[in-house]
Image: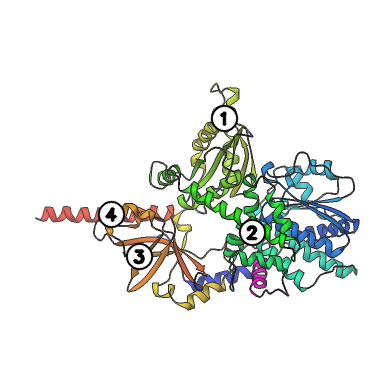
Amino acid sequence: MGKLKEITLDEFIEDVKAREALIKEDPIVRLMLVGTSMEIIKAAESGKVTILTDYDADGVCSAYIMEKTIKSVNPDCDVKVICNDRRNGYGLSPDVKGDGVSRYIICDMGSNQLPIARERLGEDVIIVDHHLIENDDIRKAFASVTTTDHSNCLCNPHALYEDDSKNAQYCATGLSYRIYQETKNICKEQGKTFLTNEKQDNTVAVMACIGTAADMVDVMDLNSYNRQILKEGIKKIDNADRNNLDFIIGYVLAQNGIGERTTARQVAFNVGAYFNSASRMCVIMNDNGAQRLYNALTGDPNSFATYREFEYLQKMNDLRKERISELVNEEEYKKFVYEQRFGKDKDNNIAIYQLPDDVPAAFAGLIAGKLTEATDKAIICLTYNTEKGCYIGSGRNSVNNKTSLIEFLDYALSRDNELFDGKNVHVGDKLDIKYGGHEEALGISSLNNIARFKSLIYSCMDKMESKDISEKTVLRITPSELNDPETLNKILQVEPIGTGLQIPPVIITGEEYGRDKYFVKNRDDWKRINVRIDGTSLFVSDWAYSPLAYPLSGKNNNEIVFLAEIGISDFKGLHIELSSKFDRLFYKERLKEIELEQQKLADKDLMNERAG
């Protein structure tokens, strides 16, 4: 394919090393972290601290690290951790109220609720958060980090520059870990207590790795130490034993399939997913799952009750997987995927999917992610919540879209009045929506009118722009190299891989074998295919079927051309794993090639006919 950029694995590795050498935390970010660390020390010395934290893995891990930080400064400090109950939605509860004694710390939420946080919890409330700030006055309050005494209660690097690409892309866990490190340094410099040991430092590093991996931050962000946090944590995991890592955390890692060689993907999709599952299942559990998880993680390692709790949480995780499997196997889901891939909506870059009523809101994000991967477009997934009397849900964006999801939605809603006013819209049909989150992943806490919302989104469809095929890079590698153990070793050199750092996909062109060619229409039901290229056999999992992978000319029904991602699997030994990927940019270019080939054949037939 002519327009695609090509790069060798060696070139890719050199590029990663060059980019890694440029990583440097902004001095202003460090000033913010140091100022917050000084406030954390004051809070610990006050003797009573309450930590309010979000319900996901990032919230749980950041609170865990924050509690360790406070206890290291003052072991006698009375610390209480309250995890947000997902059943009540994201952010501070409207009923939040201070006790008049505690110093309050808010992790992974609260930035956009600064006024109410200060009103209810005190002017000295500490907020450690990474969500985008919507209000300019609040952003300015967070950005004021250069006070005379360097103290700073507000820590959110997204406030520092209006161009967010210049801001450190830490998650709350990463910020908490950096505060742990800076607090340790400040105490040493000032001759103050900071009680820690190798086991605690290792455990905090591992928790920082789990929260960072689970929150899908940019692993190659040049303005933060995300990459180092992941590398350090993975190294601690790989070298862990009962003497140098908290036993409970080690137990959780083992229970979630972490073996002798760890990757960032395993940490995110095994451990991170397990952490997130606790709150996602809170509606089914009829309990605050995040709180139960946190209590278990900080429980008595010698108590049988602690491990019974983990057994229960694991059952909830298994049930979550079953429920998701049921949702993605519904006929409505399959029909939607087909229409978005090959039907009338195939050229749209964004789509809305409606789940059955009263599906737990937390599942909407998981389904949106799966649909984004399956259709290679932005997906907003909604479900009607009977209790709240409105729609709720989540959105995820495709990496092949140029426009960010939050940018698109902001634009669409700004156009709402212009598009719909003057058309005799009933008062009850007025669009009322509350949403927030990150640029490429957002949550919708309430929406009153899904029909009008769909109309608005589809009327602005052209503003969700996709990237050009020339912006896509593929790996130039031979089939034999993909089976070479040395290639595996090279790929391990660029770990951790994740958001912002993916090994370029590879174009597979060869002959499919082992399956009857007459069952092409049912290929979507297969999860693995075998391809032979120049005598080399490759196995490809998670087959993302597209008819464009096969020639339309009828020359060779076994010939196949598709895009595959390269990953690392530890199933029955560490090895390279190829996974097929549905990529609309790739198949759009592939269609042009097929049409050109067909035209050449038609021209040739015409010439032969005339010559005859």
Quickly name the residue at label 3: 509
Q: Of the residues under marks 1 and 2, which one precedes in the sequence?
A: 2
Left or right of 252, for residue 384 = left
Q: Earlier along the polypeptide chain: callout 3 or callout 2?
A: 2
Q: Are marks 1 and 3 in contact (CB under 8 Å)?
A: no
Which residue is nearer to you in this view: 309 or 79? 309
Q: Is residue 426 above or below residue 457?
A: above
Count residues near mark 3 (Cα–Cα under 10 Å), then give few for <14, some for 14-19, many for 20+: some
Cα–Cα span, label 1 and label 2: 54 Å
Residue 90 vertical position relative to residue 490 in the rendered view, above or below: above
Q: Name the quadrant containing residue 247.
A: bottom right
Q: Amino acid at mark 1?
A: Glu
Quarter residue 469 falls in: bottom left
Q: Position of residue 447 (x, y in %)?
A: 60, 35
First in sequence: mark 4 vs mark 2 = 2
Pointer 2: what residue? Answer: 311
- Where does the magenta region start and end? 223-242
* Callout 4 crowding tier (Cα within 10 Å): few <14, some 14–19, many ≥20: some
How far across and down, in percent of the image, does residue 108 sit? 72, 52
Say if residue 150 shows up in the picture.
no
Q: Which residue is mark 1?
A: 418
Q: Secondary structure at mark 2?
A: helix
Q: Nearer the viewer, mark 4 or mark 2?
A: 2
Q: Label 3, label 2: how many angstroms apart (C-alpha)? A: 46 Å
What residue is pinned by disc 4?
552
